[in-house]
């Protein structure tokens, strides 16, 4: 190892803890601002380069660096987005949060020729803002932020593991295979965006039907049931009453399991759920009151209204013990437990 490289390693060992502190600060800033921007992120992570990795970098490219500050990726942070069109949204946030070294920052997505394989991400070289509250020794340190989609991340990790970072020196057969995979991932990224947009459009259409009171035209699925539980005044009032009665804290859960349960009960539309509420509200309240008097709860599901309405429906519509057991088995997947729950519910029918 040359004297210059040894001096860089010594500087790294002296300053490593600064980079560790800086990494926690940078990811903390990113997580807070991405949450405020309501961008759904798979992960925000960081790493500080290990000494062995730095030695390897200096051995390969040591002529490029005179001091540790010349190496811009000692600290590397990464934002992994679910959707590729969120990459540019995150990029705008990064540009607003940090001082950017534009001469060393790279949009690797624009570097590929049409003949090359690859599926690369956006890289920024940054510093903390000069006018920020952090100590000067941290504000002087550069760090890298990579932004990529989940599928871009998958490509990068697998291709890195395979040992191929470019098309140069790769046999044509392998180049072709890698290019095909990269193309498939790019198409998949676009398709996921399209599906997400279709779901949003569908949600807007459902919202309009619910607002217009056309509940009988809205088929039950996860999207429609979730919107009904969140926006319909009758069901939200009933849910609030149950939660207040329980004295427990509310926790939000997906109502996905109730799609199958409502189908078991013959409920096809949101209008059917609304009629079930009107018909079984008082019975459901009595069941809930009895349950809360005998069971102390620390938290309660956001779908508690459906829980008691379905059970009131079972009792008031002549379902047999076998049918009720089948219903209970939809969620427990344990026959003996389902049997006990069914017998317990039947025994509560005196209420």
Image: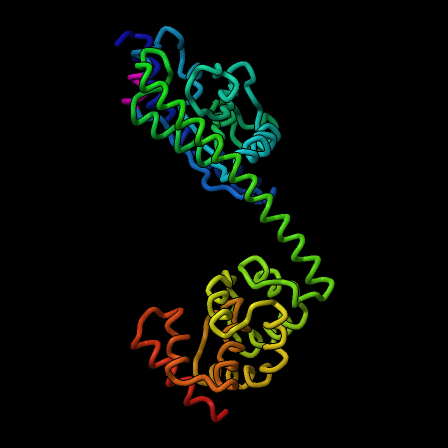
**Quadrant the N terminus occupies:** top left
Q: Give the residue at x 45% y 24%.
A: 120
Whole-percent x, y for residue 247 in the image: 53, 76
Image height of 279 relative to 92, above or below:
below
Q: Is residue 44 magenta?
A: no
From this viewpoint, is residue 300 visible? no
Q: Give the residue at x 56% y 34%.
A: 85
From this viewpoint, is residue 209 visible? yes
Q: Give the residue at x 44% y 32%.
A: 185
Of residues 59 and 134, the one nearer the viewer is: 59
Name the side, left or right, on which 202 lies relative to 78: right
Name the side, left or right, on which 177 lies relative to 247: left
Quarter of the rendering containing residue 153: top left
Of residues 239 and 333, the one nearer the viewer is: 333
Of residues 28 and 174, the one nearer the viewer is: 174
Whole-percent x, y for residue 288 in the image: 51, 81
Q: Give the residue at x 66% y 72%.
A: 234
Image height of 118 relative to 316, above or below:
above
The range drawn in magenta is: 51-56
In the picture as drawn, the residue positioned furthest to the bottom comes out as 350
Looking at the magenta stretch, what is its main secondary structure? helix
Image height of 59 relative to 47, above or below:
above
Q: Is residue 53 magenta?
A: yes
Quarter of the rendering containing residue 76: top left
Q: How many marks?
A: 0
Whole-percent x, y for residue 239 in the image: 59, 72
Whole-percent x, y for residue 20 in the image: 40, 32
């Amino acid at each position: 190892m040359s004297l210059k490289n040894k001096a860089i390693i010594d500087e790294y060992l002296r300053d490593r803890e600064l980079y560790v502190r800086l990494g926690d600060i940078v990811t903390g800033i990113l997580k807070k601002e991405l949450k405020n921007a309501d961008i759904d992120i798979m992960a925000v992570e960081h790493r500080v380069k290990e000494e062995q990795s730095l030695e390897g970098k200096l051995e390969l490219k040591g002529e490029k660096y005179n001091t540790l500050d010349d190496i811009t990726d000692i600290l590397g942070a990464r934002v992994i987005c679910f959707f590729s069109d969120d990459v540019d949204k995150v990029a705008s946030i990064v540009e607003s949060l940090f001082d950017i070294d534009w001469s060393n920052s790279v949009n690797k997505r624009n570097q590929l020729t049409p003949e090359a394989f690859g599926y690369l991400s956006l890289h920024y070289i940054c510093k903390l803002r000069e006018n920020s509250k952090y100590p000067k020794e941290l504000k002087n340190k550069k760090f890298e932020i990579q932004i990529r989609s989940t599928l871009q991340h998958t490509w990068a990790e697998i291709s890195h593991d395979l040992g191929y970072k470019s098309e140069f020196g790769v046999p044509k057969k392998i180049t072709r295979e890698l290019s095909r995979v990269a193309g498939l991932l790019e198409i998949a990224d676009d398709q996921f965006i399209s599906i997400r947009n279709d779901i949003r459009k569908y949600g807007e259409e459902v919202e309009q039907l619910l607002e217009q009171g056309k509940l009988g035209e809205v088929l039950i699925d996860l999207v429609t049931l979730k919107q009904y539980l969140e926006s319909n005044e009758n069901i939200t009032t009933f849910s609030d009453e149950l939660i207040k009665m329980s004295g427990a804290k509310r926790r939000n859960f997906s109502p996905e399991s109730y799609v199958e349960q409502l189908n078991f009960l013959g409920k096809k539309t949101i209008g059917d759920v609304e009629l079930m509420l009107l018909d079984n509200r008082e019975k459901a309240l009595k069941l809930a009151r009895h349950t809360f008097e005998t069971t102390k709860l620390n938290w309660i599901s956001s779908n508690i209204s459906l829980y008691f309405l379905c059970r009131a429906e079972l009792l008031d519509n002549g379902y047999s013990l076998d049918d009720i057991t089948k219903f209970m088995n939809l969620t427990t997947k344990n026959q003996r437990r389902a049997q006990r729950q069914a017998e317990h519910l039947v025994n509560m029918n005196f209420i």
